[in-house]
């Protein structure tokens, strides 16, 4: 398992756990990022950009460091 920001462009992974408080978890949930979701890395230069459910979501690097994923 790795943190989301360690994925390379094009890699897919499943979110295992989000290590953060209620506020962070709520912000990510509203963007479609929660445990069990499969995400695909689009770019990790600057903000971390991932694709989830055919939508592109950009999040800060600090948020991405708190999302633990398992590569698919």
Image (spheres, rainbow, N blue to C red):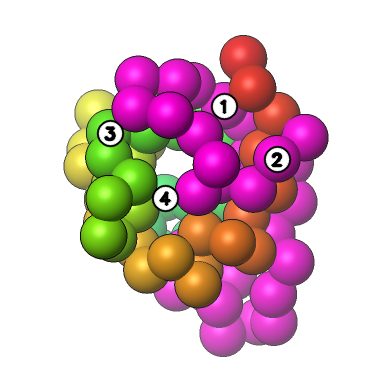
Where residue 56 appears, as percent x and y from the top left, is 22, 42
Residue 36 image position (x, y, % from top left) = 66, 35
- State which tag comes first along the sequence, 4 or 1: 1
Q: Describe the element under mark 3 as helix, strand or loop.
A: strand
| Residue under the point 69% across and 82% down | 21
Magenta-span inclusion, residue 12: yes
Secondary structure beneath dot 2 equals strand
Q: Earlier in the sequence, mark 4 or mark 3?
A: 4
The residue wearing badge 4 is 32
- SS of the residue at dot 4? loop
* Pointers 1 and 2 in contact (C-beta within 8 Å): yes
User: Is 16 or 64 nearer to us in this picture?
Assistant: 64
Q: Is residue 27 left or right of residue 10?
A: right
Residue that carries the numbered disc 2 in the rendered image: 2
Q: CA distance from mark 3 to mark 1?
A: 12 Å
**Numbered mark located on residue 42 in the image:** 3
Q: Within 10 Å of the Cα at label 2, are there few (<14), some (14-19), or many (20+) other Cα atoms?
A: some
Q: Closer to the camera: disc 4 or disc 2? A: 2
Q: Nearer the viewer, mark 4 or mark 1?
A: 1
Q: Distance of mark 4 from mark 2, alpha carbons?
A: 19 Å
For this rendering, which residue is in front, 43 or 69?
43
Q: Quadrant of residue 46?
A: bottom left
> Spatial distance from mark 4 to mark 1, Cα to Cα?
14 Å
User: Going by the image, does 16 lie left or right of 15?
Assistant: right
């Amino acid at each position: 398992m790795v943190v989301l920001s360690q994925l390379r462009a094009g890699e897919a992974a499943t979110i295992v756990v989000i290590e953060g408080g209620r506020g962070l978890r709520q912000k990510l949930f509203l963007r479609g990022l929660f445990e069990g979701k499969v995400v695909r890395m689009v770019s990790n230069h600057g903000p971390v950009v991932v694709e989830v459910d055919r939508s592109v979501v950009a999040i800060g690097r600090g948020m991405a460091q708190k999302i633990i994923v398992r590569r698919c």
